[in-house]
Every structure is written in C-alpha cells, then in structure tokens.
Amino acid sequence: MLTTLLQQDAVPFETLHARYGALLVLVRKLIGVVPNCDPFLEIWPTAFRTYNVMVPNFLNLPFVVWGRGPREAIGLAMYIASRTAGCPYCSAHSCSFALRRGASPEQIAASMNGGAALSPAQQAVVRTARALASVPVQAPDDLSQHYSLADAEWIVLSIAMMGWLNKVMDALGVPLEVSTVAEVNAIIAPSGWTPGRHLRELPADGPPPRVDTLRSKLGVVPLIPSAVALDRRWMKGVPGTWPRVGEFLRTATGHDFPVLSQLRHRRAIRAIATMIRDNFDAASSVLGRQAKLATGLIFADAVGSPGLAAALRATGATPTPESALTALARAISPSPAEVDAAVVERSRALPPAGIVELVSFLAVLQMLHRLSAYFPMQQQLA
C-alpha cells in the first residue's frame, strides 16, 4: 500500500486537532469517527483542504442531516458508487453514512441485488450511481423523472464526490477504522464486501449506527461556525455563478470547465472551482505543474474520456517520458487501482507529499469525469 511510504510523514492527529479541532469533532459526529485518511492527506495540505471543501458542499451539510433533500437516496448513491468502483474503504463509510441518514439495512442490501425494498426512484438512483462509477461510464437514468432538478443535482454531486474519495482511499490503501467495520460488516458482507487490504482482521460485529436523532442534529450546531469560517477562508474570492466562475478558472488554469454551467447550487460550484484552482496551482505543487498535468492525460486515456483530455491540453498538458511518476499514475488510474508491490517500490523515488498530490489531482479528475458524464447524457435523453 502507498500508505507504507507515507507513515513517517503522516501528520499526527494531535496536530490536526490543534489546527482544525472543531472541524474534526463535527466529522466525528456525522460519521462516528475521525477518518484515518486525514493524517495522510495533510502531508500535502492542499489534499486535506480539497477533501474538507468538497464533502460539506457536495452533500449540502448540515442541511441534509436536518432532513432537507433526498437523504436516503444520497446515501444509497454514495454506497453503490463505491461498490462499483471497488473501494472497500468508501463502501464501509458510505454504508455508515446512509444508515445514519435514514436508509434501512434492507435498502442497503437491495441496492446490490434488487428487490422490493427500493422505490422506483431509489432504483433509478442505484442505476445512475452504478453507471457513472463504471469504467467506461454508462448512460445514467434521468433522475429528474423522480426528483426535483435541485434534488437530482445533489444526488449526482454525491456520486461525483465519491469519485474523489474512491480514488484517494483506494489508491493510497487507507486503513479502515475498526469501529466503522464493526457497525456495517453484518449488513454488507453478505453481498461480497470485504475490507481487503484496508484491514487485516475483522472485528466482532456490533450494532448498526443509529439514525440521526433530534439530539444528534442539535449536537452539530455549536460546531458549525468554526467549520463555516474555514470554508469561507478556503473558498475566498471564488465565484459561485456562471459565467464568472468559468472566467475565474480560465484565468487560473487556462480552461473554463464548462460543466459548471450546468449546475445550480452555488456552494457546490464554488467548491468545485476551489478544488480545480488548488489542484492545478503551480505554486503549491511538489511534482511540478507540467509533470502533474501529463499524468492527467494518462488518467483521461484510462477512463476513455476525450473531453477530459482536451480540457487538460487546454491547461497546457503534454505527454512526458516514462518515469516513476507516470508509472504510479498508470497504476492509480483504473478503478479499482492497480497498486502492487512493484509500483510501491518504484514510488519510493517520489516525495511523500508528491504521492499525495498526484492521488488528489487524479481524484479531482475522476470527480469531474463523473460529473461531466451525467449532464451531456441527460441532454441526449431529453
């Protein structure tokens, strides 16, 4: 696992709590744990920031916890996307998230094998999540036949979000938290899920997580101001409407990423633009911007996306000679990732922060790939 190369540089949880205390407490309240990925992502701070800008703004937190939006559908979409991508880590966490937001164990099971536990609308969500997380992507359902345009967009955003999370957690081989496995294993193991390389020994099964209660909902309220302050600082100066956000990105990266013109939720638009700006930024790059852009072309080829390749070329991407970096990019690009012992050994030539940077960058591309795949196909279906 790539995490074996990162252990010595991982940022201690004590340091993370000192830097982002309220944010980590809020995450624990929402999913039951502070994820093991955090110390690895903070090795290249842009990755940690990308993660924490994305999740609340793609999931409309904390409002989704309070019952606004299609809570159960979002949880099911996250889970199926993760199972389709072959990410055991995200499959466990998204199952826990779905159960906490009101999905039943029967619905989780039915999402994998079909059955009467799912409504026609939820079945459409499952098909769409599976389609967008497949490589190559398949034609998704038109979710607006079952949900409002606003709610359909939140569902698609959750699937796109899992594109980043699936790529990062799977590629790095982030260790699974024992408590998360204990609360979901009995529910998802019958469908063939195992933690794989993310956890060597299964813990005893425990009770599933509880659905959000009034007390748990109120418990996040005191933590929101600190989280909002971080969010505003990280996204400062980023527009939330088209065409301003396209002009902003063209100035920052050389390309306007027109998929943002299809979105209606301002907080998601700003979050995506922030992720793109930060991960394409030359000043914070350990690998060097040109070398990193070249790996994007490898990813675009692996997922069969000429549109993504064209967007990367617009930002200045050109192929580069084979190296440890391109070898790692080729191993990371498939879903699931194909990182074996030989790839890990060759990656010792790369700086730890560079490994995290590469994984985050390719994960941003996977997020964009899933998001971009939905809207053109919906236009064809209309």
Image (cartoon, rainbow, N blue to C red):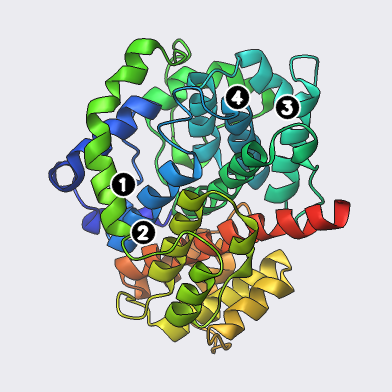
What residue is pinned by disc 4?
Answer: 72
Q: Which of marks 2 and 4 is nearer the N terminus?
A: 2
What residue is pinned by disc 2?
Answer: 47
Amino acid beneath label 1: Asp
Expressed as whole percent of the image width and height from the top left, the position of residue 20 reads 20, 45
Q: Which of marks 1 and 2 is nearer the N terminus?
A: 1
Mark 2 or 4, closer to the camera: 4
30 or 197, which is in the foreground? 30
Amino acid beneath label 4: Glu
Q: Which residue lies furthest to the right in this view?
A: 381
Q: Is residue 54 visible?
A: yes
Amino acid beneath label 3: Gln
What residue is pinned by disc 3?
Answer: 122
310 or 302, which is in the foreground? 310
Q: Distance between the residues labelled 4 and 1?
A: 26 Å
Mark 3 or 2, closer to the camera: 3
45 or 261, which is in the foreground? 261
Expressed as whole percent of the image width and height from the top left, the position of residue 206 reads 44, 12
Q: In the rendered view, would you say 355 is above or below 126? A: below
What residue is pinned by disc 1?
Answer: 38
Q: How far apart are marks 4 and 3 (CA)?
A: 8 Å
Residue count near mark 3 (Cα–Cα under 10 Å), binned few <14, some 14–19, many ≥20: many
Residue count near mark 4 (Cα–Cα under 10 Å), binned few <14, some 14–19, many ≥20: many
Q: Are marks 4 and 1 in contact (CB under 8 Å)?
A: no
Q: Are marks 4 and 3 in contact (CB under 8 Å)?
A: yes
